Amino acid sequence: MNIKGIQKQLSDFADERDWDQFHNPKNLAMALSVEASELVEIFQWLTPSQAESIMESSEHEHVKEEMADIMIYLIRMADKLNVDLEESVTDKIVKNSKKHPKTD
Amino acid sequence: MNIKGIQKQLSDFADERDWDQFHNPKNLAMALSVEASELVEIFQWLTPSQAESIMESSEHEHVKEEMADIMIYLIRMADKLNVDLEESVTDKIVKNSKKHPKTD
Amino acid sequence: MNIKGIQKQLSDFADERDWDQFHNPKNLAMALSVEASELVEIFQWLTPSQAESIMESSEHEHVKEEMADIMIYLIRMADKLNVDLEESVTDKIVKNSKKHPKTD
Amino acid sequence: MNIKGIQKQLSDFADERDWDQFHNPKNLAMALSVEASELVEIFQWLTPSQAESIMESSEHEHVKEEMADIMIYLIRMADKLNVDLEESVTDKIVKNSKKHPKTD
């Protein structure tokens, strides 16, 4: 995924709409969590097996859009805070593997 | 960002710990929203200007880790649901630009 | 607040619509968190001072409804789990006052 | 539940710790949503049937405390915004019964 390219697009998008004033990290974290809840809402009354087959339901586009919204706010926040998302993910996977050693 | 490579790592990680049974999309959406709230928690009592300078505070590693956790669950979910995250983000940006035309 | 009376109303409401099957505590916790995010959404782009005067804005009914939705799911969950909300709140205030002693 | 009495306790508690400065409705909504996610976290990897018997598990006190935290922030917010929670809940139940008529 071309994170830098998407960051440029999102930054231009915000500038052109004079939205940069709203995009402080506190507000972006809130917006991200609201989008995460919109994803949760799709699944809230489903059984685990209904959830498994969500992409064969009429909700499949809705799921993709909510996932995209989360990604968009995460990439925007990473841009504003100068966080390298790929590096952070790689570091976290290493940390997780120390915290949760393999079960043999 | 090498999404495919990270998906493979996360999938192996889950397999090796017998976690795949827990990773249905309903549970992953919940876990993602919990991580989003852990990011929100860092900012909840801060003023907007304190939030702006969070990366100069002692919380900077914490912020990166919570952002990584969100990304990890999002990538894991995309893998389980066969969603192409980059394509979904690109589609959503197009849709957003139609919904919110530029202000001139 | 007459919690017992409201619990009876909500229980009847769910029974009459055959919703009891969906109201397990996992789903109710998800629904409650989704409603909490709908409350957050009202405030996400506001400055602290705009937030302070929300009840003088056109959003005042919306705020009340989202707060009611949170309360409704919390009361419903307390009913399903046999939790005495008032006792739990009183216990938690005592615990909080030990954790955070008064500053003199 | 004696909402007025609890509001007075929470207001005194905040005053004595000089926390009133942090308790604007935006921050309280965030804090409430963070507590709701802490409740969700307890259930995120459980099956529906494990969730049903949560109060027979070692998590039963944890569940009560997270429910209390949500209630506390909701009551605090109602105090700051002059919302009558009981009236709002009653109004919302009426509205819900119009939106979702009984199935016969």
Image (cartoon, coloured by chain):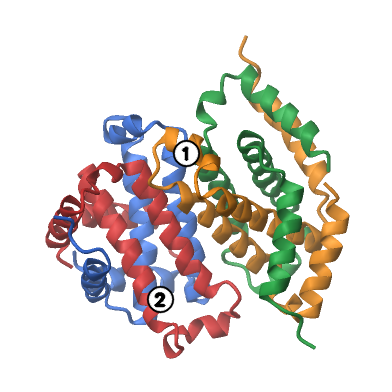
Chain colours: A blue, B red, C green, D orange
Is A92 left or right of C59, judged from the image as shown? left
Taking A28 as reference, is C2 left or right? right
Which chain is mark 2 on? B
Q: As rendered, which of A53 and D58 lies closer to the eye?
A: D58
**Residue underneath mark 1:** D51
Q: Residue at x 76, y 49 (%)?
A: C86
Cβ–Cβ under 8 Å for marks 1 and 2 = no
The circle on residue B19 is none
Is residue C30 left or right of D96 when viewed as pictured? left
Residue B102 in the image: x percent, y percent?
43, 64
Which amino acid, mark 2?
Val
Question: Count the marks: how many?
Answer: 2
**Which residue is drawn at the image coordinates 42% and 85% (left, top)?**
B55
Question: Label 1 is found on which chain of the structure?
Answer: D
Q: Is residue D46 visible?
A: yes
Q: Which residue is label 2 attached to?
A: B63
Residue A65 location in percent, x, y?
35, 48
Most foreground residue, D62 or A24: D62
* Location of residue A14 with respect to B33 vertically, above or below: below
Q: Quadrant of residue B9?
A: bottom left
Classify D54 as above or below D94: below
Instruction: State the SS at label 1.
Output: helix
Q: On the image, which quarter does residue B50 sit in?
A: bottom right
Residue in the image at 86% along x and 64% along y: D8
Q: Amino acid at mark 1?
A: Ala
